[in-house]
Image: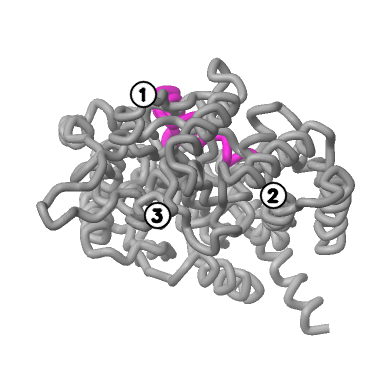
Amino acid sequence: MKKLISMLLVLMMVLSCASALADLTTDGYDGSAVTITFYHIINKDNQLEVLNNAIAEFNKEYPNITVNAENAGSYNDILKRISEEINGGNQPNITFCYADHVAEYNKAGAVQTLDELINNPVVGLSDEQKADFVEGYYNEGMSFGDGLMYTLPFYKSTEVLYYDATFFAANGLTVPTTWDEVEEVCAKIKEIDPKSIPLGYDSEGNWFITMTEQYGSDYTSATEPHYLFDNDTNKAFVKKFNEWYQKGYVTTAGLYGAYTSGLFTSTDETRCYMCIGSSAGATYQRPKKGDDGNYPFEVGIATIPQVDPANRKVISQGPSVCIFKKSNPQEVLASWLFVKYLTTNTDFQANFGMQSGYMPAIKSVLNNADFQAYLAKADGGDNIAMLSMKVGMDQTDAYYTSPVFEGSSVARNQVTALMTKCLGLTENVDAEIDAAFQDAIDECEYAN
């Protein structure tokens, strides 16, 4: 009974909030004093300084809006906390979020859709501002199956291919741009260094999902049936990667037991010469300096291999921000103005990107003089973070979004486990791959 009453109260709040926002005039924010709470995960002093400076600048324009910016722990901490707060109607105004978290919050209809705000003639986004967002990042906000916008991107990371540029140059190897070329390069590296595992891939889930995008095969759908990844195309690339693993060409974080950057930077006999990992983790892909003060090798960074280089697909990850419904429409408008400021302000986006190593959400940062100078320092040694950022910013046309629904994170977990299991298969491989796919689908269906 208590749960039912709580759900009814939440429903009443949602209806009231929707009505209140719909009643707004085109005058927008009326200047009244409001306090908005913003949950984030930022915990490094240099990044907090950039955020606090942005809040101070925002308050020069909107002195009656008090922004209570709070580090609310990890992403999972925020998810748990807000899910509990929604039941009492005391959720924050704004939060860092992943798309599947928004789907969770929306079980109670608590997230404010942004369409009315984006298109508001007074406080909305101009056509130039909309076009300034990296398209793949922006589209994530409307990947929930109903065509509505729920989030705006804050900052993002991607996957890139790290490679030992010194080794490649010394052995006349060409950096692979396709998966067929990866196989060829791995075979050559094995001949040069039989003890090596030429390629490390840090995320089995990312690998699977990205391959479905590159092949144009089904993965999931925001509308039922949700789970579509059990198909011949996907089974074929999983079997190919199984063959690579059996030849010693590749390993993954799940199979290796740790991030494969450890193999890439290793000084032991067994190491890898290519590693696919997060662009934001570039400094972990850089080897330690030797006693002579020099790096043992130079790191090169490139776009991950493709099925078709003319139709590149690369995953993007990292937080967006969403706004929660409130009974006071001025709180919603104030929240929108702050979100708009953080996501469209070129100086803030550039400064935060330089301090964090994450990629800004908007393309106009490339016109920022400080950001240009930052990228100009890019190299495979001391300034490897700049090089990673540069590669990430050069492939903005390649970013994609996956459908989001309640249970979309379950699919990701299951294909991660599927890849880990299937790469290690040695007997009855075809039959076992078929069974693994069916088991993964069953687990997804059971979880929901």
The numbered mark at residue 292 is: none
The Cα–Cα distance between marks 3 and 1, rounded to whole angstroms, is 21 Å
Residue depicted at x 73% and y 64%: 11
The residue shown at (58%, 49%) is: 21
The relative height of residue 236 versus residue 385 in the rendered view (above or below) is above
Which residue, given by chain and number where applicable, does mark 2 sit on? 423
Work out which quarter of the rendered image holds the N terminus and state it.
Answer: bottom right
Which residue lies at the image location 23% right of the left edge and 33% below the top edge? 375
| Pointer 3 local density, CA inside 10 Å: few below 14, some 14–19, many at least 20 | few
Q: Earlier in the sequence, mark 1 or mark 2?
A: 1
Q: Is residue 110 left or right of residue 39?
A: right
In the rendered image, the quadrant that contains the C terminus is bottom right
Q: Secondary structure at mark 2?
A: helix
Structural crowding at the residue carrying mark 1, measured as other residues with C-alpha within 10 Å and reported as few (<14), some (14–19) or many (≥20): few
Q: Nearer the viewer, mark 3 or mark 2?
A: 3
Residue under pointer 1: 172
The question of residue 137 being in magenta is answered with: yes
Q: On the image, numbered disc 3 is attached to which residue?
A: 269
